[in-house]
């Protein structure tokens, strides 16, 4: 158990819909990262937050957004869903701020299926 | 730009065989960190090792060992006497200043009994 909690574990929805994925980082970790894992793209970095502020952006679509709340949990919002958004979405946390020199602790992922 | 290449998409071995997973990286920075993660069939990502660019010493942890060679930009991972429980997808990853962790495409290892 990494200490990172993600909900829901599985989600099935239709094209055009909007979903929210939630992540609670390990106790004491200030950084939260979101990754998307799909068969064709592999593990892609989406976005990082540190103590409530956005720190780095990766290949995140404009239809996607995220935020980190004062209690440090984070939410990833996916809207106008397309079939290609079906993937496993991972949240990870770490203590470090910018340069992630330490290990990332990953949650078990949220598997999104768009029909 | 940084990049991680795991040329081996899939490897199949029989139990007790040794297996090496290759990882080649690209970066222009002199300070960077390399990682290996394991993703078993259950799906979670498990941290295995971290190496910084100034430490080329090889590391051994039980049946696992890692060979870091800056001259060839490689960070290979060897499992000795493989076991069925080693079956998983293994990811090599790279991190440098100001960027998030970048992963390779992964190598799927299947160990049969």
Image (spheres, coloured by chain):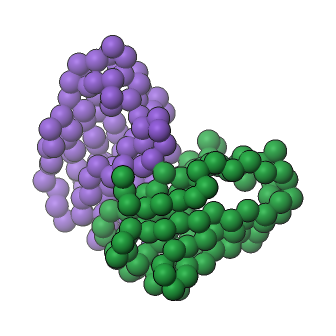
Measured along the vertical axis of the image, is residue A99 above or below residue B83? below
Residue at 43 percent of width and 42 percent of height? B39
Q: Is residue A68 left or right of residue A63?
A: left
Location of residue B14 (image quadrant):
top left
Location of residue A93 (image quadrant):
bottom left
Picture coordinates of residue A13, whole percent (x, y): 78, 51
In front here: A18 or B90?
A: A18
Q: Is residue A41 left or right of residue A102?
A: right
What color is chain B drawn in?
Answer: purple
Picture coordinates of residue A106, whole percent (x, y): 43, 57
In front here: B1 or A25?
A: A25
Which quadrant of the rendered structure holds the C terminus of chain A?
A: top right
Picture coordinates of residue A71, whole percent (x, y): 49, 81
Q: How many marks?
A: 0
Q: Is residue B113 left or right of residue A16?
A: left
Location of residue B101 (image quadrant):
bottom left
Residue at 28 percent of width and 42 percent of height? B76
Residue A104 seen = yes
Q: Is residue B23 left or right of residue B82?
A: right
Letter of the chain in green:
A
Measured along the vertical axis of the image, is residue B10 above or below residue A19? above
Residue B26 seen = no
Residue at 25 percent of width and 35 percent of height? B78
In front here: A112 or A43?
A: A112
In front here: B86 or B104?
A: B86
Measured along the vertical axis of the image, is residue A72 above or below residue B64? below
Residue at 37 percent of width and 16 percent of height? B112
Measured along the vertical axis of the image, is residue A73 above or below residue B79? below
Picture coordinates of residue B43, whole percent (x, y): 49, 42
């Amino acid at each position: 158990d990494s200490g990172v909690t993600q909900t829901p574990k599985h989600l099935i929805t239709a094209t055009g819909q909007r979903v929210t994925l939630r992540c609670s980082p390990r106790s004491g970790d200030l950084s939260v990262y979101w990754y998307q894992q799909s068969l064709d793209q592999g593990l892609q970095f989406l976005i990082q937050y540190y103590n409530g502020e956005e720190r780095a952006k990766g290949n995140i679509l404009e239809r996607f957004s995220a935020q980190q709340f004062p209690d440090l949990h984070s939410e990833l919002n996916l809207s106008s869903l397309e079939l290609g958004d079906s993937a496993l979405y991972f949240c990870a946390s770490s203590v470090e701020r910018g340069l992630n020199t330490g290990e990332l602790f990953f949650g078990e992922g949220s598997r999104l299926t768009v029909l | 730009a940084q990049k991680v290449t795991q040329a081996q998409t899939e490897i199949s071995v029989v139990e007790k065989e040794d297996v090496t997973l290759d990882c080649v990286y690209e970066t222009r920075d002199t300070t960077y960190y390399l990682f290996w993660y394991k993703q078993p069939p259950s799906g979670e990502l498990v941290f295995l090792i971290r190496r910084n660019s100034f430490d080329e010493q090889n590391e051994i942890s039980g049946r696992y060992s890692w060979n870091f060679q800056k001259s060839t930009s490689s960070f290979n991972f060897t499992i000795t006497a493989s076991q069925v429980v080693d079956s998983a997808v293994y990811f090599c990853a790279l991190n440098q200043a100001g960027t998030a962790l970048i992963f390779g495409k992964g190598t799927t290892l299947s160990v049969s009994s």
